[in-house]
Image: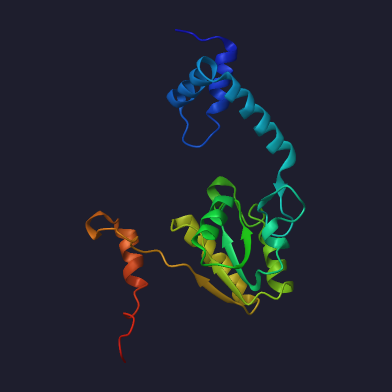
Amino acid sequence: MGFSPRLEQLFAALRCLPGVGPKTSQRMAFHLLSRDRDGGRRLVEALAAALDGIGECRRCRMLAEAEVCGICADPARDDGLLCVVESPADVLAVEESGAYRGRYFVLLGRLSPLDGIGPDELGLPLLQQRLRDDGIKEVMLATSATVEGEATAAYIGSLAERCGLVATRIAHGVPIGGELEFVDSNTLFRAIAARRPLAGESG
């Protein structure tokens, strides 16, 4: 069965979202057109407003409606600590942990030469300038535990060291409540490598 050109166009537009394939895009389109046209209009308005009104913070590359995001503008943050992450979603995850009060730099990706993503695409010239000029003492690398994420962390770690700064890497290990038999080998390897003495253990 063939669909109308406008419906096919809507399917194709929805497939730009991550994880949305042909069947999911069809379900979304049918839902909006059959059951929630008002929701669809609100979605269009909100998306248009976001695309027109949200850009990148000039200091950290976080999504922001102003030239500088709220975190960069907050005088209570620790200027000596910079957390480097891959995406705005990572900033939210770190913030929700409540364990961090420093500044951020958002790469908007990770090094991947095969995909044409190099240092310039990740804003590393801007990052290097901040490492030199912003009074940073420690760079905390919070990139993903993938091959590309590790390569990105190593590259930025070398930049930090050349600027005379401490470079640290967040630990990747077994989640709270996780059972070892269900943990993948890469995660378990990192958990073992990042092991530390038990609290209160002597000597």
Q: Is residue 76 left or right of residue 149?
A: right
> Hey, which residue is sitting farthest top in the picture?
1
Q: Position of residue 23 (x, y in %)?
A: 43, 23
Q: Position of residue 101 (x, y in %)?
A: 59, 68
Q: Quadrant of residue 147?
A: bottom left
Number of numbered labels in the structure image:
0
Q: Position of residue 156 (x, y in %)?
A: 58, 66
Compared to 77, does 148 lie above or below?
Answer: above
Compared to 131, does 1 lie above or below?
Answer: above
Residue shown at 58% from the left, 11% from the top: 5
Q: Is residue 7 visible?
A: yes
Residue shown at 50% from the left, 37% from the top: 18
Residue shown at 32% from the left, 85% from the top: 200
Task: Identify the image quadrant of the N terminus.
Answer: top left
Q: Is residue 125 visible?
A: no
Task: Identify the image quadrant of the C terminus.
Answer: bottom left
